[in-house]
Amino acid sequence: MDSIINGDSIGVAVRRARRSRGMSLEVLAGRAGHTKGWLSKIENGSLRLEKREDIAALAQALEVSADTLLGEPAPEVQPGRRPWSIAPLRAVLLDCAPDDPPDVRPRPVALLRQLNGEADRSLRWSDYDGLLRDLPPLIGELEAHAAGPGGPGRDEALRLLILALANAGIILRYVSHPDLAWVAAERSRQAARMLGDPVWDGAAAYGLAHARSSANRPRALLATPRLADGLEAHAGSVMGRDVYGMMRLTAALACAVQGDHAAAAEQAAEAARVAGGMDDRPDAWELFGPANVGVWRTSLAVEAGNAADALRFAGAVNPRALASGNRRGALRIEKARAYAMLGGGHEAEAVAELRAAEKLSPAQVHNAPMVRDLVGHMLNEARRNAGGRDLRGLAWRMGII
């Protein structure tokens, strides 16, 4: 089935899927909980699909994966898109496992700990070439240690392996390979089960919840409110608190994609309570702290259709407190979505935010389906208004034109 490539919008993908199902506008709109007029505007490009909740509802009504509408998984080579060398990472994920490691002689765990820290910094500051180069041997050698005899060294190797596989999942999502991101998350869950620590089980569950687009409403995501409840008893340690807080934020996303924005706000408020009084530690797991909670609350407000609230949350975030170009870029992306949602002359502000995000995290901007859809929609509007030089440049770098 067709998907969004070469500049097609999500609305075009919806229309193609609907027609392939022999479904009328009225029937699909009713099943998705909207009007025929709303769906017609989505399909003809005069309205954007701004919320994951609506994408999920349309995908369910069409009986297709949300990935089909979003254009994922992507082929390895697309015209106008940056090719990434993922073959070594694919090989170590598909051919090896924590209990079936590659035939390698691993370097000492202490050295692998240092290399894992360097890989984490590469991800945070968008050195994707370095990360894709360094992760495969790192994962393989950590698996070799994990499959060895028990003891402190093996336990540390398993913890490092969970972190390395989480980074693998994130970079694979950024470069549009969610299928392999899911494999990385499954390998992480295997490692956590071998470790037998509930906090690290939670860390692996977090990775699994984010391995696929939330618009698919994957079971691993929808399970997070229950998992967060179970982690509360383990929030006494620093790592336990970080995992618990990030799982509450993930639970908020799970509620949002199901349309329960009141429950999403409650989950996010609990995360904010846990982060209250904390400093933003650069070494925090998944950067849990007040600033990252602010980024999440900005995104959740956008998902709820509350652009003004989103900009208020964003305005309270100190970007310098986020020790990651990716998270700073994510904040800019959510601000751009909020400005575009406001309309009424705020398009220039949306473009400025996206250009700033592009400098911080180019692959995140260029490959994210909803960002591509936003840029394509604004580009059409700019063409009609005979403007948009900065926007055309951004669209060209994204391979949309």
Image: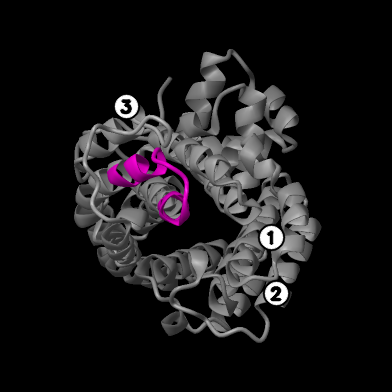
Disc 1 or 2, which lies upstream in sequence? Answer: 1
Overall secondary structure of the magenta stretch?
Answer: helix
152 falls in the magenta region:
yes
334 falls in the magenta region:
no
Q: Position of residue 355 (x, y in %)?
A: 32, 68
Find residue 187 and report its image quarter. top left
Q: Nearer the viewer, residue 9 or 385?
A: 9
Q: Nearer the viewer, mark 3 or mark 2?
A: 3
Q: Give the CA distance from mark 1 to mark 3.
A: 34 Å
User: Relative to 326, does residue 400 appear above or below in the rendering?
Assistant: above
Residue underneath mark 3: 95
Q: Position of residue 214 (x, y in %)?
A: 58, 44
Residue underneath mark 1: 248
Disc 3 or 2, which lies upstream in sequence? Answer: 3
Mark 1 vs 3: CB contact within 8 A: no
Q: Nearer the viewer, residue 108 or 261?
A: 108
User: What amino acid is labelled 1 in the image?
Assistant: Arg
Q: Position of residue 47 (x, y in %)?
A: 55, 47
What's drawn in magenta, residue-wise?
141-158
Q: Residue at x 70, y 26 (%)?
A: 26
Taking 191 as reference, is 312 left or right?
A: right
Mark 1 vs 2: CB contact within 8 A: yes
Residue underneath mark 2: 274
User: What amino acid is labelled 3 in the image?
Assistant: Asp
